[in-house]
């Protein structure tokens, strides 16, 4: 199984790396990082670069596509090389997936028309512009071969859920133990349903996805 | 606050990127990725490289040090540039931290003598060789200025806990919501206390940290 993770400038690093660390342990799978132009891609803060080894055209038919988000998604969305590659890859992929605002990129490629999908919680309504039906209360949303995850850290849960579908619960459980994924956040404010309303409004007002939505 | 994340070849990407995505949102903080030799560092599978912009000697006095693990930790441990930098940085750091087998690197630098510490669960006993007291049942272990996290994904919890210490619960809660960190793993096998014993033994037998321990 060939897994392609799309990179672009100003991506969110955890959106890409969370699923990568899970999916690379899938038996028989190989992961490739791809970009319109291969090379280092700066992440949102600029402090870190992730390297894409291959151009999009070198990996036209991946079995599983992972599209991260981040505020660079808006520029990636405007790059026809990216949207055309996504459309082509989705024709034959087994799974086409996104994390965070990566779902807006799937939408811009025309893949979410009539689909249930999620995104970073501040960007959910923006899904409607692509004909998608935003799903606010599911962290990982399956609609046929398209799987979208909520914001940033949700990519880890999405990848473990995908592994369960692809290779079975036993394999997913082994990967979870290997990653010691027994989350114990010190607070319980990770979703709009759990965080205090005033915090939700503060983050929404200052969201880095304001341009995208 | 200057935050330095150490990179080296064959590191675990999520060990470094999990804390990075949390800590970069700390008000007034700047993150720098450093390595003995600047440039791209391949992660464990080889499929991804993370770029270190700066040499260790260019960042001698960070306020917060993050040391990831991965099976490349064993080679990093043998590099005196790395262990000397860690010792020097720890002299003045406010916090010296590790994720996963990064704690063995802290140990090799002589920083864990007499300290309580954790690591990836398959590597806990190896801490003893550095005079540390392994702590099996805490995901994030504080001992003075040294903070160690359990395997891979535990770095996210560690970073949120550190933000709480440094900037208060309100800031940590805001970051948690921004990262939409409301974990919902599809299974409950993320620690040795929760996974079936036969799975624990299978992973232990095949651990990629076998050389390190």
Image (cartoon, coloured by chain):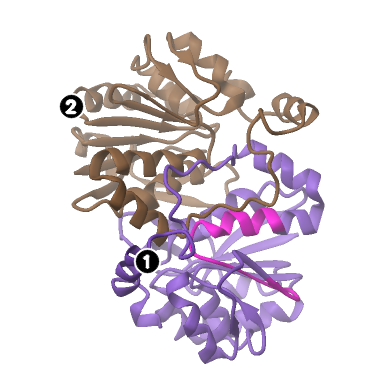
Chain colours: A purple, B brown
Q: Secondary structure at mark 2?
A: helix
The image shows residue A143, relative to residue B25, as above or below, that is below
Q: Residue at x 28, y 25 (%)?
A: B145
User: Residue B116 falls in which quadrant of the image?
Assistant: top left
User: Residue A117 falls in which quadrant of the image?
Assistant: bottom right
Residue A23: % across, % down = 66, 53
Say which chain tag 1 marks. Answer: A
Q: Secondary structure at mark 1?
A: helix
Q: CA distance from mark 1 to mark 2?
A: 40 Å
* Residue wearing tag 1: A197
User: Residue B8 falls in which quadrant of the image?
Assistant: top left
Q: Residue at x 48, y 41 (%)?
A: B15
Quadrant for the N terminus of chain B, please.
top left
The one of A121 and A88 positioned closer to us in this rendering: A121
The disc label shown at residue B34, or none: none
Residue B91: % across, % down = 20, 22
The one of A93 and A60 positioned closer to us in this rendering: A93
Q: Residues within 10 Å of mark 1 (few under 14, many from 20)?
A: few
Quadrant for the C terminus of chain B, please.
top right
The image shows residue B144, relative to residue A204, as above or below, that is above
Residue B204: % across, % down = 70, 25
* Residue wearing tag 2: B92
Q: Nearer the viewer, mark 1 or mark 2?
A: 1
Magenta stretch contains residue A159:
yes
Q: Are marks 1 and 2 on the same chain?
A: no
In the picture, measured across the screen, residue B143 lies left or right of residue A81, that is: left
Q: Residue at the far front: name it.
A: A197
Magenta stretch contains residue A34:
no
Q: Please state the extent of the stretch shown in magenta in the rendering.
A: A142-161
């Amino acid at each position: 199984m060939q897994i392609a993770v799309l990179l672009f400038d100003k991506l969110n690093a955890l959106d890409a790396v969370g699923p990568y660390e899970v999916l690379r342990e899938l038996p028989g799978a190989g992961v490739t990082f791809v970009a319109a132009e291969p090379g280092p891609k700066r992440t949102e803060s600029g402090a870190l670069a992730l390297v894409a080894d291959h151009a999009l055209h070198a990996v036209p038919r991946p079995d599983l596509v992972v599209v991260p988000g981040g505020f660079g998604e808006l520029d990636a969305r405007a790059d026809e090389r990216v949207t055309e590659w996504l459309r082509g890859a989705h024709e034959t992929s087994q799974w086409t997936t996104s994390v965070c605002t990566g779902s807006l990129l799937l939408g811009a490629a025309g893949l979410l028309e009539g689909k249930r999908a999620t995104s970073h919680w501040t960007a959910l309504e923006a899904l409607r512009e692509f004909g998608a039906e935003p799903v606010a209360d599911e962290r990982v949303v399956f609609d046929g071969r398209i799987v979208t995850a909520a914001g940033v850290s949700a990519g880890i849960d999405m990848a473990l859920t995908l592994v369960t579908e692809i290779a079975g619960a036993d394999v997913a459980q082994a990967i979870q133990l290997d990653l010691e994924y027994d989350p114990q956040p010190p607070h319980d404010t990770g979703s709009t349903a759990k965080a205090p309303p005033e915090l939700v409004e503060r983050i929404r007002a200052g969201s880095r996805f304001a341009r995208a939505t």
